[in-house]
Amino acid sequence: MDQEVQTKQKLIESAKADFLEYGFKNASLRRICKNADVTTGALYFFFKNKEDLFEAVISEPLALFRKMFVRLVNAEFTDASAFESSEEEMIRFLLRYRTEVIIILEKSEGTKYEDFKAKYLQTLESVFARFFGKYIKDPDPKLVHIVTAMRFYGYLEILYGDHTEEESVQLAKKIGVYADAGFEGLIRSLT
């Protein structure tokens, strides 16, 4: 039993590295097996196909992310002071699952997740629009889109950067301070 768990984990780790380097479309099951030092038969013992293996790599982090996202959004809508702790929790999560996040955002072409980035940005945009709507009537969708993208891509810059975890947390907090001050100034200019 222990051997099976170890073999499956080796396959998942090898697949994670292959998906990160080559993307889903160009990932090779033979290469994954070779790098995991297992046979292709062993791979098919655990996984139906490449899609199933991809799912094994990203399903747990994705489920955890979705739960966290809903919880953090709800917390911020009920208590604006929750924002700073939310920023820290979000960046620590993204760093912990850096590889999986990059795979799903940038390397998932050919899977059912290939439009995840666009869908997530749309969801984030609707959250930002709802938040803007607390302060101004009918927020400009173009402005909401740009502000959302600025925030999203700011996080990606941290994620893709060569920073320690603590440097990343501090950068995320500073982005949050900048965003808060900018938001307050923007609301004043629009009312």
Image (tube, rainbow, N blue to C red):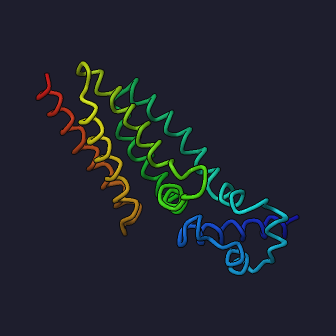
What's the residue at 35%, 26% (across, down)? 130
What's the residue at 79%, 59% (across, down)? 48
Q: Residue furthest right?
A: 1
Work out whether 136 lies above or below 145: above
Horizontally, is 20 left or right of 150 in the view?
right
Q: Identify the image quadrant of the N terminus.
A: bottom right
Horizontally, is 9 left or right of 182 in the view?
right
Q: Could you say where residue 45 lies in the image, as x and y percent from the top left? A: 85, 64
Which residue occupies the foreground of this view, 76 or 41? 41
Q: Could you say where residue 51 lies in the image, as x and y percent from the top left? A: 68, 58
Which residue occupies the foreground of this view, 12 or 172? 12
Q: Residue furthest left?
A: 189
Q: Residue furthest top?
A: 137
Work out whether 107 lies above or below 150: below
What's the residue at 34%, 61% (across, down)? 167
Q: Could you say where residue 140 lies in the image, as x and y percent from the top left? A: 24, 29
Q: Identify the image quadrant of the C terminus.
A: top left
Q: Quadrant of residue 10?
A: bottom right
What's the residue at 29%, 22% (across, down)? 133
Q: Could you say where residue 108 lies in the image, as x and y percent from the top left? A: 55, 58
Q: How many marks?
A: 0
